[in-house]
Image (cartoon, rainbow, N blue to C red):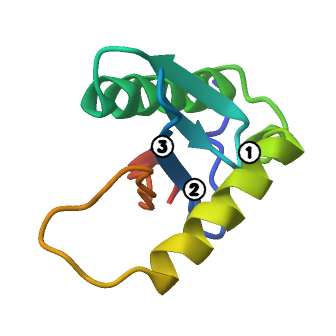
Amino acid sequence: MAPIKTYKKPLTLRCFAYFDGEYYTAVCLELGIVEQYKESLEKALFMLDKAIDGYLKVVKKHDYPDELLYRPAEKRYWRKYEQLLNQNLKAPETKIPSLPLIHLYNHPIPAYA
């Protein structure tokens, strides 16, 4: 039986979502995973979460190298992230967020913590 692969530091993923007028797009910057849907922001975020979870399970199951835990998204998504982050820092606080929306979170990965 192969030893269980463990990682010394927690894996933190920066993810964000936005609406471009036609599609809701959800992006994981560190893994280069992108999901787009017309239906809703919630659907795009849900599918992004499923894609991240599936990717990490495959990496762990096949004992792939740690380098696969960082495959950055295309530069255009990093630029979009910076643009949205700057917009959100300048925007006045409201009770209802407007789109484009930036959604940052730490993806819970107990097996990798």
Marks 3 & 2, CB-CB < 8 Å contact:
no
What residue is pinned by disc 2? 13
Q: Quadrant of residue 64?
A: top right
Local secondary structure at mark 3: strand
Towards the viewer: 2 or 14: 14
What residue is pinned by disc 1? 77
What residue is pinned by disc 3? 18
Which dot, 3 or 2, sits closer to the camera? Answer: 3
The first of marks 1 and 3 along the sequence is 3
User: Callout 1, which amino acid?
Assistant: Tyr
Marks 3 and 2, Cα distance to the nearest angstrom? 17 Å
Q: Crowdedness of circle 3 by 10 Å Cα count: few (<14), some, many (20+)?
A: many
The first of marks 3 and 2 along the sequence is 2
**Which label belongs to residue 85?**
none
Q: Residue at x 76, y 54 (%)?
A: 78
Q: Is residue 51 left or right of residue 59?
A: left
Residue 67 in sight from this viewpoint: no
Residue 52 in sight from this viewpoint: yes
Q: How many marks?
A: 3
Local secondary structure at mark 2: loop
User: Callout 3, which amino acid?
Assistant: Tyr
Q: Residue at x 37, y 34 (%)?
A: 45
Q: Crowdedness of circle 2 by 10 Å Cα count: few (<14), some, many (20+)?
A: some
x, y percentage for residue 37? 43, 16
